[in-house]
Image (cartoon, rainbow, N blue to C red):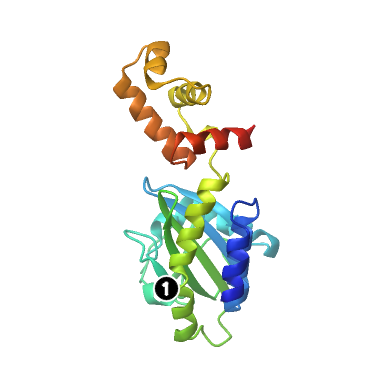
């Protein structure tokens, strides 16, 4: 696990941070596939790293992000932070019929997403980051011996360092946040902020109250994952 931690820390601030984090942890626990998904507070999901496409399962991961993530008992209603086994979250779908779900007792949780790899052992590492919960999920064929309790515990003990690394990376890089996440008004406020305008000047320029400007500023900071004007200016420089 130490080498995985070293790889992750070394990639902070780099474009390859997500790949380094996901792949180094995957190798450390001896699994075949890995994916990283950000589950937002507003129930949306965002794909951070796709380790499925090279193995031919990219559509399954896309179906999960776009359609079925809200049905996973590992995530909803409240994800359990740390390292967990999918087999501990098994549910009985009975005779349910869902467009993007395949219900079968052959799967650890009693179902799989359409186009998902079949009969896999799944381990999830969940950490609070980027105004939501990041899910790092690992998969391999169940024919092998399952991950030991000691290995699962060791993975869970990395929750703190992983959370800290995501926080630091969010401050010094451009994760997947873009100006497209902002509303039209928030874009106007953003442009004036990076031009050096004060809240009072922005209010006068846009014909809105200072209180409204303050609300828009908060949303800009949240959506672009920055914590100060200095970080916003740095974000703008890297984006351009």
In this view, 207 is above or below 6: above
Residue at x 51%, y 66% (from the top left corner): 137
Q: Which quadrant would the N terminus be assigned to in this image?
A: bottom right
Residue 222 position, x and y percent, is 42, 40
Q: Which residue is mark 1?
A: 84
Which quarter of the figure has residue 6?
bottom right
Q: Which quadrant would the C terminus be assigned to in this image?
A: top right
In this view, 196 is above or below 24: above
Residue 71 position, x and y percent, is 39, 58
In depth, the one of 217 and 95 nearer the eye is 217
Task: Using residue 102 as the reference point, say whether residue 20 is left or right of it.
Answer: right
Residue at x 37%, y 65% (from the top left corner): 73
Residue 95 position, x and y percent, is 37, 66
In depth, the one of 146 and 142 nearer the eye is 146
**Is disc 1 surrounded by few (<14), some (14 to 19) or many (20+) residues within 10 Å?**
many
Badge 1 marks a residue whose secondary structure is strand
Residue at x 37%, y 11% (from the top left corner): 207
């Amino acid at each position: 696990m130490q080498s995985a931690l070293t790889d992750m820390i070394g990639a902070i601030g780099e474009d390859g941070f997500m790949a380094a984090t996901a792949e180094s942890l995957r190798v450390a626990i001896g699994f075949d596939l890995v994916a990283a998904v950000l589950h937002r507070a507003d129930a949306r999901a965002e794909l951070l790293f796709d380790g499925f496409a090279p193995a031919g399962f990219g559509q399954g991961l896309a179906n999960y992000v776009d359609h079925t993530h809200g049905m996973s008992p590992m995530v909803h209603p409240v994800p359990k932070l740390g390292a967990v086994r999918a087999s501990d979250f098994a549910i009985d779908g009975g005779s349910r019929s869902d467009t993007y779900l395949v219900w079968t007792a052959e799967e650890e949780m009693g179902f799989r997403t359409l186009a998902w790899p079949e009969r896999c052992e799944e381990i999830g590492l969940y950490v609070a980051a980027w105004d939501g919960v990041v899910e790092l999920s690992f998969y391999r064929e169940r024919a092998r011996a399952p991950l030991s309790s000691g290995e699962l515990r060791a993975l869970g003990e990395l929750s703190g360092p992983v959370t800290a690394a995501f926080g630091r990376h969010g401050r010094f890089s451009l994760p997947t946040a873009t100006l497209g996440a902002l509303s039209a008004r928030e874009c106007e406020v953003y442009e004036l902020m990076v031009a050096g305008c004060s809240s009072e000047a922005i209010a006068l320029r846009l014909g809105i109250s200072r209180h409204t400007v303050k609300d828009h500023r908060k949303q800009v900071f949240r959506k672009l994952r920055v914590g100060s004007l200095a970080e916003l200016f740095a974000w703008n420089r890297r984006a351009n």
